[in-house]
Image (tube, rainbow, N blue to C red):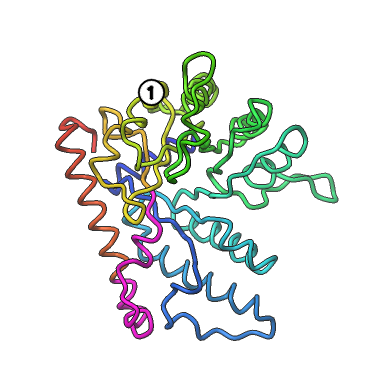
Amino acid sequence: MNIVDKLIENTIRTKNPTVVGLDPDLSKIPACYKKESAENPFQAVANVIYEFNRDIIDTVADLVPAVKPQMAFYEKYGSCGVAAFEKTVSYAKSKGLVVIEDAKRNDIGNTAKAYADGHLGKVELLDESYAPSIDADFLTVTPFLGSESLKPFIDICVQNQKGIFVLVKTSNISSGEIQDVVCENGLTVSQNIAKYLAEQAEKHMGERGYSAIGAVVGATYPAEAKKLRQFMPKNYFLVPGYGAQGGCAEDIVPCFCQDGLGLIVNSSRGILYTHMTAFERENLTKAEYLHKVKNAVLVMQEQIYNTLKTHYPNMIY
């Protein structure tokens, strides 16, 4: 199965395009998780991270189609953190979730291929066999080294039924300093990337008419998102910027297609942290905290679903 079809199936099953960002920020994780001890202090943190992620995954697995662990929160703890990341990926997939690795990798030539092999494909072992390593379903990729840097990732996706989300128009405030610059052909940098991705989409199409060669398009720029959807009618979108960064349900409507599909919407802090007061962070039990997480997911689902039904009454879920 093309991985984008699995993402769509999960979205229809849960009636929810929400993706939960697994960003384990130790300063924000509830105190009830911070009782782990180990001889290696980095391992102690990694144990907390994995336990936290496992509980979040168990809480949301029947409510959302996918999770998105952000590699930075794991890599900063070295090999222990990366091991916790790998365990998180494996556990989330065992629960039927699609896993989007947010690592924003890129390079050219053999280095790009090595990134693609390690994160999405298979790597060579000493006995000359090949095996998956991190084995995420999707990987975020930066495009600013040009097409020769994206081709290795696209090739690996096709070979291994995986997907990528390429940065096109990001949600941060300063994104326009580069992404909105108008090029000689009259298109912005973002629009030129979108045009290229639309051409590449045909190489990795799913049965439902969408491509696993996707795009990152921020919720904080709805007018630009509307234009980019016109450039990329078949590319699946990953939409950050909802909630804590200011995006709302109305803002993401231009990213959807008429069937109510075509994108997934990420929320990290809004689901994991912002619903807690400082007192609650120190005093909530795990059960109380996870109830808040579940409620945050359900509130976001209701907001998006009701808004979508208003704009697209014939959507398929």
Q: Position of residue 66 (x, y in %)?
A: 42, 50
Q: Which residue is mark 1?
A: 233
Q: Secondary structure at mark 1?
A: loop
Q: Residue 59 versus residue 219: which sits nearer the camera?
A: 219
Q: Residue at x 35, y 85 (%)?
A: 283
Q: Residue 194 versus residue 258: which sits nearer the camera?
A: 194
Q: Residue at x 36, y 24 (%)?
A: 227
Q: Left or right? Give the position of 106 relative to 166.
A: right
Magenta: main secondary structure equals helix
- State whether residue 131 is above or below residue 148: below
Residue 138 among those drawn in magenta: no
Snapshot quadrant of residue 147? top right
Q: Position of residue 241 (x, y in %)?
A: 38, 48
Give the magenta part as a residue range.
Answer: 266-291
Q: Left or right? Give the position of 228 relative to 158.
A: left
- State whether residue 269 is above or below residue 8: below
Q: Position of residue 234 (x, y in %)?
A: 41, 25
Q: Residue at x 85, y 51 (%)?
A: 126
- State whether residue 46 is above or below residue 139: below
Q: Residue 111 versus residue 125: which sits nearer the camera?
A: 111
Residue 285 among those drawn in magenta: yes
**Amino acid tagged 1:** Pro
Q: Residue 231 versus residue 298: which sits nearer the camera?
A: 231
Query: Badge 1: few (under 14), some or many (20 or more) residues near its Cα, within 10 Å?
Result: some
Label total for image: 1
Q: Residue at x 54, y 37 (%)?
A: 164
**Which image quadrant: the C terminus?**
top left
Q: Position of residue 266 (x, y in %)?
A: 39, 49
Seen as rendered, the residue at the extreme top is: 185
